[in-house]
Amino acid sequence: MKKISTRIVITVLICSIVTSVVVGATSIFKSVNVIQKEAHNNLISLSQVYSGVFDEDLVLYEGTSTDLHQVVSGTIDTTRLSEKGYLENYSDTILRPIVRGVARETNKCAGIYIAIDPRYTGRTEGSWIGIDDNGTLTQGLPTDVAGMSQDDDSAAFYYNAIKAGKGIWGDPYLNHGNINVMTYSSPIVVNNETIGVIGVDLRVRDLIKGIQDIKLYDTGYGFLLNANYDYLVHPTLDSSNNLKTMEDGLYSTMVEEIESNNIGLIDMDFDGESKLIAYSKLYDGKIIILSVPKAEILKEMYMTLYIISGVVLIAAILATIISLVMGKMISNPIVFITEVIGTTSKLDLTDIEETKRIKMLFNRKDEVGSIFRATGLLREEMRSIIRAIEETTTNIVENTTTLTSATDDTAQSISDVAKTVEELAQASMGQAADAETGSEKLYKLANEIKAAVTDGETVVNSSMKAQEINQQGLKSMDEMVEKFNITNESTNSVVKNIDSLLEKSQSIGKILNIITGISEQTNLLALNAAIEAARAGEAGRGFAVVADEIRKLSEQTGNATSDIEGILNTIQFEVENTKDNMDQSESALNDANTTLLEVKKAFEEVYSAISTSMEAITQLDQRLGFVDNDKEEAILAIQSISSVTEETAASTEELSASMEEQAATMESISNNTDNLAKIIEKLNGLVNRFKL
């Protein structure tokens, strides 16, 4: 069985470690989500930033093209387009100054052209203004597309917009001035008739360089696709590669995702490794894509994981140390109290040396302090009660010894009285027989009066002897009465001591009830603590275990109290038996005392009868001289003597029977005294089980 301290430490440690692991796992999970979400948002935001920069220029240039379209449609006379010199003059006087001014004022502009369809004059009329890297303007006519097929790449700048019927952006390319540009061309429609094309060249060198210079994390990069998913800007691929068709359509899922949304993030394998792909469509349908390996994004997350794991490990170590210290602080008082209760359950009530630790436990205000104080009070009360029981049993033993001695003396006296009464009865019977014989022979033996006188003297002597025996019987009876009084006093003292012992045993029962109440209250408090700990969830589980241990300790206290209560009930039962026996002894002594009084009265009657006999014998002696003269009176006197003697014999027989009853009563008292001695011996055995 594990110690409570070990169980508390293990419980607290498990709770702490579980809590740390849960917190750490939650932190890691949240950190991973936050880092991934932040990375996703950053990539999407970055793609939006680059696309926003492109879109600003695209919108600006489309606006410029629209403005020029409005100028042309508002100034050109479509009815004169075929007129000789009209378009040339219109280009020199109206278009060229306007285009020059717009080209100079438009940021990042590499050139502007307005080309009029060659069907009007046989050649491409209009105006073209170019701007080199130094800002120098160059002017001339647009490329002549007369006679060129619409599928000719050289005429694409013109026919692509007409085919589309709206403004379109071309892919980046190097113009004649070796400048990387991207052209926005739109048809010139006047009065529902397409008369030419307006083109604006946007310098994209800085934008392309910006894409090429994109560096995300360690190896992440950006690239640009056109609306057909051809690579326009990429660190290693050129426009001959197409995302939709490369590697047998491996990235078709990615293409479908891009076609479905203007902006988004894709988590997929790309270029042979797991990557996050952020994309954003430009105003003209081109796509800026940012590609970053997931391992590089999560590198910071891994560092966070290491930090959190280290913190969890340190927290677990600290929790182990704290749980060891707290477990000792919590369990040591409980273990000490358990040892004290265990010592008490073994009936060892010797004083415990008062130390600083015991004082601290005694002064504690919690349930542990209450149990310790209650245990101390129980031990002190039990010591007092056991000492009182020892003193009471000692007094009972002494009084029982005195009672036994007095009973033995009384029995001996009764035996002597019985013998004396028996002798008196025999003498009385002999006297009656002699009186009857004298009466019968009086008529015939008048001459033997002297012999009768002699017989009278014999009767006198016998009567005197009977009187002496009677006096001895009275004296013995007085002694017996005195000893019975002593016996009664001893019995009363024993009864009082037993009553006192019974009251103190009952007081122990009350104290045990108090301790039982405290134990039940402690059990209830532990149950309430367990309930509150359960409400607290994981954070309160250690305290729930502590509460459960306190409840078990309370149950052990209740069990120990029940054992003590059983012993106390045994003592009370034996004391009550002793009291019942003493009550029987007291009743028997009262009966014996009554019988002695009756015997004493009988002795007094015998004494009175003997005295009467003595007087009669004296008169007989005086009248012997007159017997011869007055025989009848002598006969009557002899008959009187015979009657008195018979009464004396009957009284003596009654006295003998009373003595036998008295002897039986004394034997019962003696037996009860022996039983009392055995009960006291058993009680001493119970008391000696306690170690004071």
Image: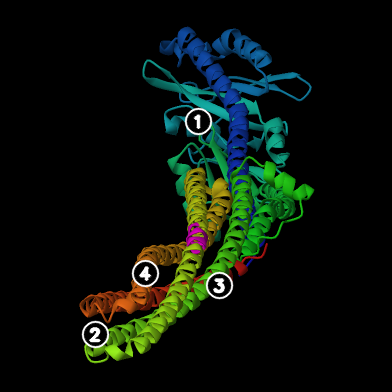
**Alpha-carbon neighbours of circle 3 within 10 Å: few (<14), some, or many (≥20)?**
some
* Range covered by the magenta-colored residues: 485-492
| Image coords of residue 352 (percent x, y) | 73, 56
Judge by depth and name the residue closer to the eye, 123 or 163. Answer: 163
Residue 312 is tagged as none
**Alpha-carbon neighbours of circle 4 within 10 Å: few (<14), some, or many (≥20)?**
few
Judge by depth and name the residue closer to the eye, 38 or 625. Answer: 625
- N-terminal of the two: label 1 or label 2? 1
Measured Cα–Cα span from mark 4 to mark 2: 19 Å
Q: Residue at x 36, y 70 (%)?
A: 606
Q: Residue at x 62, y 36 (%)?
A: 42
Q: Check the image and report above or below for 24 versus 161.
A: below
Residue to which mark 3 is pinned = 405
Q: Would you say the residues marked 1 and 2 are in contact, meaning their CB atoms lie under 8 Å apart?
A: no
| Image coords of residue 207 (percent x, y) | 67, 32
Q: Nearer the viewer, mark 3 or mark 1?
A: 3
Residue to which mark 2 is pinned = 439
Judge by depth and name the residue closer to the eye, 287 or 535. Answer: 535
- N-terminal of the two: label 3 or label 1? 1
- N-terminal of the two: label 1 or label 4? 1
- N-terminal of the two: label 2 or label 3? 3
Q: Is residue 24 left or right of residue 624?
A: right
